[in-house]
Image (spheres, grey):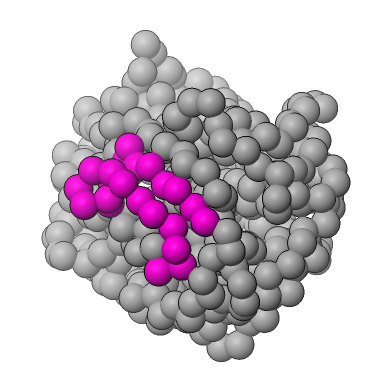
Amino acid sequence: MKIRVRPVHRLEGRARVPGDKSVSHRSALLGAVAHGVTEVRGYLEAEDCLRSLHAIQALGAEVTKKGPGEYRIAGAGLEGLGEPGDVLDCGNSGTTARLLLGVLAGQPFATMLTGDDSLRRRPMARVAEPLQRMGATFLGRSGNSRLPLAVRGQRPLEPIQYAAPVASAQVKSAVLLAGLWAREAVSVTEPSHSRDHSERMLRKFGVTVESRGLTVTLVPGPLTATSVDVPGDISSAAFLLVAGAIVRDGRVAVAGVGVNPTRTGVLDALEAMGAAIAVGERVEGDEPAATLTVTPSELRGTTIAGGLIPRLIDELPVLAVAAARAHGVTRVTDAAELRVKESDRIAAIGRELGKMGVRVTERADGFDVEGGARLRGATVASGGDHRLAMALAVAGLCAEGETVVEDTACIRTSFPGFVELINTLAGGDVLVEQA
């Protein structure tokens, strides 16, 4: 699948993006081990999150679809999951795999996880290492660090106080989930704050979770089913916000977007670049939401580094596109994590934007983008990375001539309807999908 992108001079309208990917995954996994029935509204019906639903069904939770994005999850409780009859295929979803390992660490049976070619290349040791210290056993490729990976849990697990070497919500969440089956409280200390969706949702399900500074502590206890309203995904909204900021004219409003402070680094970065973004219609709750409105702006280069990185790690591909349209140099550092995403995003950003005339200097933990060049249409490739595919399509909106983005079926893993939504805002078929 490929997308032909035609340049556009105006984006106008009000839109909604699909449900938050991180919140959707967690609602499925916690609903599966809760007592009672959890009702989820706004669930992201993209390939990655559907993998989590299939996994919990295979483990014994009952999942019923009630309508678009609405699911009923009848949980098995902490003691009720059972050994699946087959290998659990996580597809392209690193979140499914890593968070599932945390759940499976506390189960007294063996499970095998696998995934697609991309996921089988991604590291699992960062999750497996603390879970092994808690008592789980792993067997797999590359020294038990790559899928396919077998895990045999135990119950109870040993409590740990884990000092994470990097800020990672997936590692933190896996340890906290395993802690549900620990003998005593478990804690995770990070070098900087990562997204806190797991802590918020665990509390909503009735678990005692305390956050002090950079340390999160969970006290084992049962989960009680609840209702979950999933806000729009700010990682998906970021593509519309950047597009609205760099296209010549218009006004784009994205309604119902999750604005959890641990996820809004993209807003901070865009505002530092001079983007005109208004936050309105704010709704407080377990996961706060708001309407984000952007108008075209003259952007300037900035530095994105340090504690800001965990709050926008997934948005860096599209922020690189904003940087290409800004005046001056934008520098990204402390982002070595980009090397082990769905692709090596540092290398891919430099290579593919370079084809469009952008000067990108690659470094071990980031990159510099020299802004101000005219983007030219080119044939570029996502390498199967959904966020890179969408970022390149956004770049094509303000390039001279047609841009062809190859290998775009991956967009379905996180943002079904992306092409249709951009075309609606553009008032025509500026993104054309072809087999």
Question: Magenta segment: does it hold 271?
Answer: no
* Residue nearest the viewer, comparing 112 with 53: 112
* Residue nearest the viewer, comparing 38 with 260: 38
Q: Hey, which residue is sitting farthest bottom in the picture?
A: 213
* Residue nearest the viewer, comparing 319 with 204: 204
Q: Which residues are magenta?
A: 133-154
Please name the residue shown 56% across and 36% down the image. Answer: 83
Please name the residue shown 38% across and 42% down the image. Answer: 150
Please name the residue shown 17% across and 39% down the image. Answer: 355
Left or right of 22, for residue 387: left
Q: Residue 391 at what x, y percent from top left?
A: 38, 43
Question: Magenta segment: does it hold 140?
Answer: yes
Left or right of 350, for residue 275: right
Q: Is residue 56 above or below residue 5?
A: below
Residue 362 visible in this rendered orientation of the protein? yes
Q: Is residue 428 above or below residue 313?
A: above
Please name the residue shown 23% across and 43% down the image. Answer: 141
